[in-house]
Amino acid sequence: MHTRLPLRRLATAVAVSAAAVLTTLTFATPAHAADTVDVNLSGVPGSFTAGSRGAATLSGTFQNRGNAAITSLQPVFTIHLDGMPPDGVKVVRLTGGELNAQSSGAGTVTFTDNNSFELTRNGRRTVLYALQFTATAPSGKASITLEAYSGGSRLGGDDASTTVKGNAAPVTASPSPSPSNTNTGLQPTFTNGPSYSLANPGDDGGNAASDASTVPVSLYVMGGLLIAVGAVILFLLFRRQKPIAEVATTYPVYDPTRPMSLGYPRQAGSHPTAVLPTVRDVEPPTLPGPPPSYPHR
């Protein structure tokens, strides 16, 4: 009974460890897939003045948290300001030129950086951008989102907000059409930096994103080993024990009342091969007397 108690505790500990590993695998897989790339957006000021000469310098840092390299990573900006036209904001990469603007809805403009780059395993990359709201931007609260895409899949992102002090009146519920203002304000000019040429970036990007979002195989192996050890311990604990009667018949029992024998079988009615004579106390033999005497003639 005392020897089974440590085994039961060990089996309980192994079962709890296996359950913890499986729970970690279950809940960690979606989060790992959604945050393959850690994106950090910094440098966003608290307020902007639309149409001002200065532009804010934003810093986008990308760090690979996956288990494989990402060969084609594209940063994408999404800026939303209620009532902002597509030309109300501009984004320029300091080493690659101005990004193309694309309207994604009312007051939402998307900028895709076509200068994709590679992130090795645990690799880190920082890219600088210049952000400017033009004179056509209205006043309001603007949200700025920087996301990392590869092969059409979102791998991570970060966002910030700022207050825009614009010259244009805020948009009402039913805006009236007005001619667009051709005065776009000061456009920052930057020299072109190094260019990147990647053959078929979309083909490898999807594979890289899927490989980076997988869980390490070592966690599955460790969980399987824990489950196997727990099963063996439970089998040893709860296996059927032999009955006492069976154990008694299996092993010989010494009986001190019976004489020891050499193990030879005895047959009923048999007698010893040699019978010892009975020894008795007898009288000593008589010595012969003198010879009889005869008369002399």
Image (cartoon, rainbow, N blue to C red):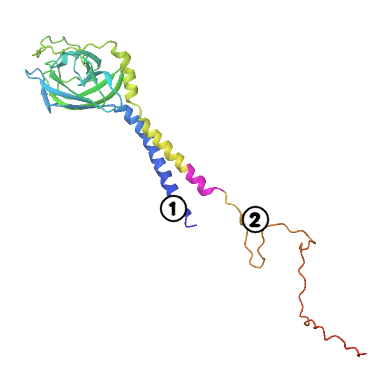
In terms of image quadrants, where is residue 15? top left
The answer to if 137 sits in the magenta stretch is no
The residue range painted magenta reads: 231-239
Label 1 neighbour load within 10 Å: few <14, some 14-19, many 20+: few
Q: Amino acid at mark 1?
A: Pro
On residue 127, the disc is none
Nearer the observer, 42 or 24: 24
Nearer the observer, 143 or 112: 112
Nearer the observer, 99 or 234: 234
Q: Is residue 182 left or right of residue 255?
A: left
Q: Position of residue 217 (x, y in %)?
A: 37, 30
On residue 249, the disc is 2
* Residue at the disc numbered 1: 6
Residue 174 visible? no
* Circle nearer the N terminus (2, 1): 1
The extreme left residue here reads 53
Q: Amino acid at mark 2?
A: Thr
Vertical comparison of 54 with 274: above or below: above
In terms of image quadrants, where is residue 248? bottom right
Residue 252 visible? yes
Q: CA distance from mark 2 to mark 1?
A: 31 Å
Vertical comparison of 180 with 18: above or below: above
Q: Is residue 247 left or right of residue 126?
A: right
As helix, strand or loop, the secondary structure at mark 2 comes to: helix
Q: Position of residue 235 (x, y in %)?
A: 51, 45
Q: Position of residue 183 (x, y in %)?
A: 10, 10
* Placement of the C terminus among the 4 image quadrants: bottom right
As helix, strand or loop, the secondary structure at mark 1 comes to: helix
Q: Is residue 227 left or right of residue 182?
A: right
